[in-house]
Amino acid sequence: MNGGDGDMTLAFELTALKALEDPQAVFTGARQWTSYVGVISDEPTYVVTNFTRKHRIRQDFFSGPRSREESLSNIKTQFDSERYVLVGTEEDDERLADETGWEYVDVETAADAADWQLATTTPSVEFEEDTHDDWP
């Protein structure tokens, strides 16, 4: 994954980021060899925000309330880099990268190349809602 000169914009599909053992360490390490790093997803903005806050991830961009395709296109116009790389988990991610002019790297391949650890378990709950058991 090391691009050498750091002139790369790196986007993680949220599912790929969730597949990693320590997303915060991944972002911290990626900042050493990328110019920009962020998260894209079709999930609502609050899901991405909650995940990144929980893992103390500071992202340069996120998809917000738009489609992943629109997000990748906008990122290319807003962040000037020699390379644009999407880390994903499925064929649909690869298709999306091809359609928007991004390079695609599967999360397992990226983890192997960058010495990232894959998560050994998948979280059973995507988003925990606040419950108010003490309310009448």
Image: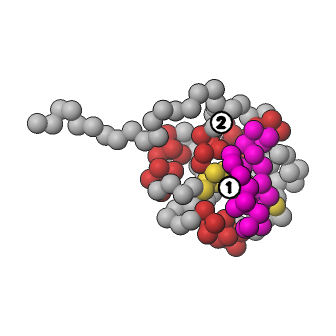
Nearer-N-terminus badge (1/2): 2
**Which image quarter: residue 5?**
bottom right
Q: Is residue 66 left or right of residue 32?
A: left
Residue 35: x, y in percent? 75, 57
* Foreground pick, 26 / 67: 67
Image quadrant holding the C terminus, namely top left
Residue 22: x, y in percent? 63, 34
Q: Is residue 100 above or below residue 124?
A: below
Q: Is residue 35 visible?
A: no
Residue 27: x, y in percent? 67, 44
* Foreground pick, 90 / 70: 90
Quick one: which residue is furthest to the left in this view?
136
Give the total of numbered labels. Answer: 2
Q: Which residue is mark 1?
A: 92
**What secondary structure is found at the residue carrying circle 2?**
loop
Instruction: Work out how far the residue at label 1 is from the one at label 2, CA to CA, in angstroms.
Output: 19 Å
Residue type at numbered disc 1 = Asp
Q: Inspect the magenta stretch and tell me whether residue 107 lies in it.
A: yes
| Cβ atoms at labels 1 and 2 below 8 Å apart | no
**What secondary structure is found at the residue carrying circle 1?**
helix
Residue name at image x 59 percent, y 27 percent:
121
**Which image quarter: residue 131?**
top left
Q: Is residue 50 above or below residue 76?
A: above
Q: Which residue is mark 2?
A: 20
The range drawn in magenta is 84-110
Quick one: which residue is furthest to the front in this view?
91
